[in-house]
Image (tube, rainbow, N blue to C red):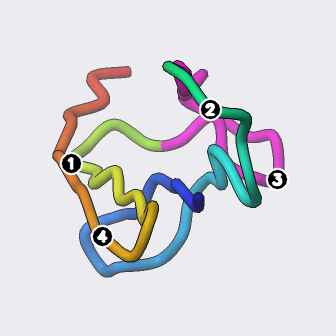
Amino acid sequence: MNAGVYDVAGRLVRTLQRGTLTAGAHELEWDGNTDAGRAAEAGLYFVRMTADGREYGTRLVRVR
């Protein structure tokens, strides 16, 4: 499974998960930082996840 946060230009901002997870429910949390450790700018972001050959996504707004 791979999951990440992307900006409106489609650039990867933060990797949330890469690789296999054990069976069962899991939670992924974004702390608002980029992969470089800096706070992401306020704005619209997209969370994209691929698992078992399927793609999932949602959008979120960071307000600070």
Residue 36: which numbered mark, if any? 3
> Is residue 5 shown above or below 26?
below
Q: Are marks 3 and 4 in contact (CB under 8 Å)?
A: no
Q: Are marks 3 and 1 in contact (CB under 8 Å)?
A: no
**Mark 1: few/some/many CA within 10 Å (<14, 14-19, 20+):** few
Residue 23: which numbered mark, if any? 2
- Magenta stretch secondary structure, dominant: loop
Callout in the foreground (3, 4): 4
Relative depth, front residue between 41 and 55: 55
Using the numbered discs, state the Cα–Cα distance from disc 1 to disc 4 in whole angstroms.
23 Å
Q: Amino acid at mark 4?
A: Arg
The first of marks 3 and 1 along the sequence is 3
Q: Which residues are magenta?
A: 26-40
Using the numbered discs, state the Cα–Cα distance from disc 3 to disc 1 in whole angstroms.
19 Å
Using the numbered discs, state the Cα–Cα distance from disc 1 to disc 2 in whole angstroms.
31 Å
Q: Are marks 1 and 2 in contact (CB under 8 Å)?
A: no
The first of marks 2 and 4 along the sequence is 2
- Read off the residue under disc 4: 54
Q: Amino acid at mark 3?
A: Ala
Secondary structure under badge 1? strand
Q: Amino acid at mark 2?
A: Ala
Callout in the foreground (3, 2): 2
The first of marks 3 and 2 along the sequence is 2
The first of marks 3 and 4 along the sequence is 3
Callout in the foreground (1, 2): 2
